[in-house]
Amino acid sequence: METIKIKYFTDQIDKLEYIDGKSDWIDLRASEDVTLKAGDFALIPLGVAMELPAGYEAHIVPRSSTYKNFGVIQANHCGIVDGSYCGDNDMWRMPVIAMRDTEIHVNDRICQFRIMKNQPQIQFNEVEKLMGKDRGGFGSTGKQ
C-alpha cells in the first residue's frame, strides 16, 4: 500500500476517505463558499495539497452529479496533478465554468480524484502502414 502525505488548509471540510470504503475514486470538497453567475469562471479551492508517491499522478474529474447539483462544468475536463505539484502552498483546485447562476458551499462534494501510475517511457516507431484491421475511421460505429 502506498502512503501519501496530505496537508489540509482548513478544518471545515471532511477528511478524505474512500466512498463506501472501496471505491476507486475519492471525493474532493470545496473549501470555500463560491457564488457564480452563468458564464463565470472560477478555480474552486479544494483545501488539500499532497505529496504523491514517486511515479504517480492524480486525475481530477467532476462527480456524476456535479452538473446537476451545481450547474458547473470542469473547464479542462480532466485535471492532472503531477508529482512535482507538491509544495506546502500547492492547494488543489478545480477550474469550472458556470452554466447557470449557482452557489457552492464549504464541504460540498464537487469533484473526485484517483491516483494513477505515470505513463511508462515509450518510443515511437514511424511506419508507412499499420497492420491492424481498418475499422472505417473516427465515428465509424454509427448510431444505435
Image (tube, rainbow, N blue to C red):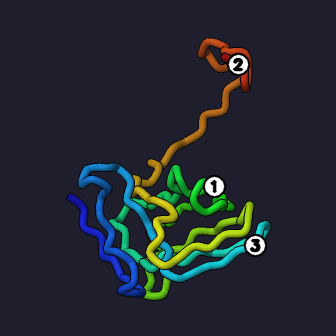
User: Can you say which quadrant of the picture contains the C terminus?
Assistant: top right
Q: Is residue 115 left or right of residue 77?
A: left
Residues at circles 3 and 2 in contact by the CB criterion of under 8 Å? no
Q: Residue farthest to the top?
A: 133
Q: Amino acid at mark 1?
A: His
| CA distance separating discs 3 and 1 | 20 Å
User: Which numbered disc, 3 or 2, marks the residue that appears first in the sequence?
Assistant: 3
Nearer the viewer's eye, disc 1 or disc 2?
2
Residue topped by disc 1 = 77
Residue topped by disc 2 = 143
Nearer the viewer's eye, disc 3 or disc 2?
3
User: Can you say which quadrant of the picture contains the N terminus?
Assistant: bottom left
- Relative to residue 131, is residue 104 depicted above or below? below
| CA distance separating discs 1 and 2 | 24 Å
Task: Name the quadrant containing residue 102.
Answer: bottom right
110 and 100: which is toward the camera = 100
Residues at circles 1 and 2 in contact by the CB criterion of under 8 Å? no
Q: Amino acid at mark 3?
A: Lys
User: Which numbered disc, 1 or 2, marks the residue that appears first in the sequence?
Assistant: 1
